[in-house]
Amino acid sequence: MADHDTASATASVDGGVGTITLDRPPANSYDPSFIEDLDAAISTVVDAGVAVAVVRSASERFFSAGADVKGFLSRTADENNAMVRRAHEVFDRFAAEDCVFIAAIAGHALGGGYEIALACDVRVAAEGSYRLGLPEVTLGLLPGTGGTQRLPRLIGPGRALEMMTTGRSVTPDEAERLGMVDRLVPADSLDEVVGEIATTLAAGAPLAIAATKRAVHQGMRQPLPEALQTELAELAPLFASEDATEGMTAFTEKRRPDYQGR
């Protein structure tokens, strides 16, 4: 695991909620070591067994500006391709793990930085004058850490193509209208709103939350008939779980359920 005194992505756990903090000044631009730090941070929150983790930035100006362009120029094409392949492996973990990952965005999220947010399950953004987008085409590249696949699935191929082929970035207001972020909140309320979502998830039924996430992510890759079978396959063991019995019993008894993850 990375040395968290100098790591550019660190993790902590408090009260059943994990936090991953991106911290590579000045812009949280990523390089190979950043990607390994992020991988280690994901492992920390997953190994702690949390149901939810917030991905945030230590910077007031940047969520992340994406890949370090000077770093690209200093490496060979093969080295750059290897770094991007490794970034794919790490970013894919956000969907693959049972933990729900919430991106809390309060500064510029551009290129690979926005692709980190795209890889998360939920995106909550603060109001402000910063920008979000995938401008890689302006560098003669394409959004290569998931952007060409995740953004069209989020906002539709036409809108996504317009943004990615022009390199246009948008304000948080437009990002919400387009569906690039799921919630837009006043800047001074971001931590509170994200905290409320995380606390709700942490107190929820962990087996059901994880099964819901798996059904959504797997189902998105399948034709509808197969995806509906995936849904049924995820539901079946829940009916046999202690948590479902507790949840339904608590509902009939008009009390708060006490879920144990069994």
Image: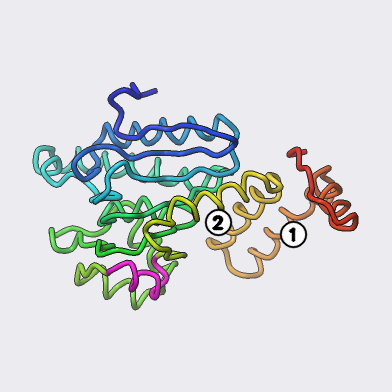
Kind of residue indicated by mark 1: Leu
Q: Which mark is residue 117?
A: none
Q: Does the magenta run of residues contain 178?
A: yes
Give the structural element (helix, strand or loop) at label 2: helix
The residue stretch that appears in magenta: 171-180
Residues at circles 1 and 2 in contact by the CB criterion of under 8 Å: no
Question: Percent from the top left, x then y, of residue 43?
Answer: 48, 32
Q: Is residue 49 above or below residue 108?
A: above
- Residue flagged by tag 2: what amino acid is it? His
* Left or right placement of residue 50 versus residue 44 in this view: right
Q: Which mark is residue 232?
A: 1
Quarter-of-image position of residue 14: top right
Q: Quadrant of residue 85?
A: top left
**Residue drawn at 31 percent across, 41 percent down:** 58
Image location (x, y in percent) of residue 175: 35, 69
Please identify the quadrant where the N terminus is shown.
top left
The chief SS type of the magenta part is helix
| Residue where numbered disc 2 is placed | 217
Residue 149's place in the image compared with 63, above or below, is below
The location of residue 104, given as percent across then percent down, is 41, 52
Q: Nearer the viewer, residue 197 or 230?
A: 197
Between residue 239 and residue 189, name the one nearer to us: 189
- Classify the position of the C terminus by image quarter: top right
